[in-house]
Image (cartoon, grey):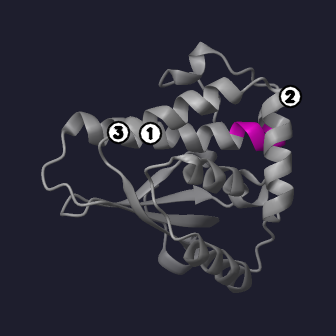
Amino acid sequence: MEYLRIKLTFMNDKKPYLLDISSLFYDFELLHDFCLIAYADEYKYYKFNNYFWYRKGRPIKKEHRIKALRIEKESPLTVEIIVDAIVGLSGAFWALVQAIERISNWKLNREKLEQEVEKLKKERNIKFYEEQQAKVEFERKLLEREAWNTLNSLLRRLEANSLKLKDIEISSYSENDYGKKNE
């Protein structure tokens, strides 16, 4: 099975509060789920409501859930996750990137990120949505599904967290290449 590996590196905070770490992980998973639900056709009948915020309030299939590959609590906090390639194939990947870029106090090197995506496309011959197409479709789907308020609330939560994203790296991950891990 093909996955996208996303490595998130946060700014130095030698002793972050456990609540900040757990909230960050949960809110990032919510962001992933939000983008997936907004894009993937198999979730098109999901209605965004207050249940979205609950632990089991989203009908995400097991194979579409984020999996933790590695977590390093040493300074800086680094988290490696893998997500199903459907995230990239459905356009949800660009929605996720666009949402992250909207968080004003998360400073990312956009050029580096674009280079990594191009490299990934070539490495695995994965067809991603084009960024402009994804942006237009993302906005259209948010309007159709009446989900702008949910997205804005989620982004505010991530922005309010004391842990700030410093860097994001994206690459491919395959069970064939690395064996069956994290099953």
In the picture, the disc for residue 51 is: none
Q: CA distance from mark 3 to mark 1?
A: 5 Å
Instruction: Give the labeled residue for mark 1.
Output: 158
Residue 110 in the image, given as x and y percentages of width and height: 58, 69
**Which residue extends farthest left?**
15
> Which residue does the image show at 58% across and 44% down from the upper left?
32
**Which residue extends farthest front?**
104
Is label 2 in a helix, a strand or a loop?
Answer: helix
Instruction: Give the labeled residue for mark 2.
Output: 144
Which quadrant of the structure image shows residue 77?
Answer: bottom left
Residue 11 in the image, given as x and y percentages of width and height: 29, 60
Hey, what amino acid is under mark 3? Asn
Is label 1 in a helix, a strand or a loop?
Answer: helix
Magenta span: helix, strand or loop, mainly? Answer: helix
Is label 3 in a helix, a strand or a loop?
Answer: loop
> Which residue does the image show at 46% across and 60% down from the upper left?
107
Check contact, mark 2 vs mark 1: CB within 8 A. no
Check contact, mark 3 vs mark 1: CB within 8 A. yes
Instruction: Give the labeled residue for mark 3.
Output: 161
Screen quadrant of the N terminus: bottom right
Q: Which residues are magenta?
A: 37-42
**Count of numbered badges drawn on the protein:** 3
Residue 39 on the magenta span: yes
